């Protein structure tokens, strides 16, 4: 599973960080991003990333 955050959609609600803090972080401008090295999500974190995606109000998180 791969994950990305669409910077044009993200509004900085940080729900992704709440659900998957190992994978997401807030940048200096207050928007979410995928932490370096987690673009490909480890198996043990995939469920939390799916929850983060489902709870993003801006639909900024994409999973493939």
Image: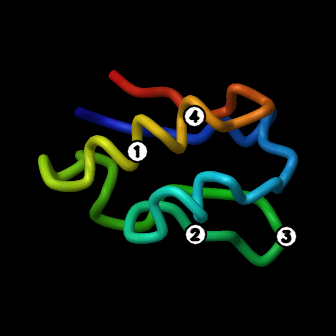
Which numbered disc covers residue 29? 3
Please name which of the two marks, 1 or 4, marks the residue nearer to the observer: 1
Q: Is residue 22 left or right of residue 47?
A: right
Mark 3 surroundings: few (<14), some (14-19) or many (≥20) residues within 10 A: few
**Mark 1 sits on what residue?**
49
Q: Earlier in the sequence, mark 4 or mark 3?
A: 3
Please name which of the two marks, 2 or 3, marks the residue nearer to the observer: 2
**Mark 4 sits on what residue?**
61
Decide which of 60, 45 is in the foreground and name it: 45
Residue that sits furthest to the top in the current view: 64
Q: Is residue 41 left or right of residue 16?
A: left
Which numbered disc covers residue 25? 2
Q: Earlier in the sequence, mark 4 or mark 2?
A: 2
Q: Is residue 40 above or below residue 2?
A: below
Which numbered disc covers residue 6? none
Q: Are marks 2 and 3 in contact (CB under 8 Å)?
A: no
Residue 20: give x, y in percent of width and height.
45, 59
- SS label for mark 1: helix
Q: Earlier in the sequence, mark 1 or mark 4?
A: 1
| Structural distance between the alpha carbons of marks 4 and 2 | 13 Å
Name the residue: 24% across, 46% down.
40
Please name which of the two marks, 1 or 2, marks the residue nearer to the observer: 1
Q: Where is the N terminus found, in terms of image quarters?
A: top left
| Structural distance between the alpha carbons of marks 1 and 2 | 12 Å
Q: Are marks 1 and 4 in contact (CB under 8 Å)?
A: yes
Q: Is residue 14 left or right of residue 18?
A: right
């Amino acid at each position: 599973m791969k994950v990305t955050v669409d910077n044009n959609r993200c509004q900085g609600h940080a729900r992704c960080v709440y659900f998957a803090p190992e994978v997401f972080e807030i940048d200096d401008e207050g928007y979410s991003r995928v932490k370096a090295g987690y673009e490909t999500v480890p198996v043990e974190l995939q469920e939390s990333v799916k929850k983060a995606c489902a709870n993003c109000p801006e639909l900024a998180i994409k999973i493939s």
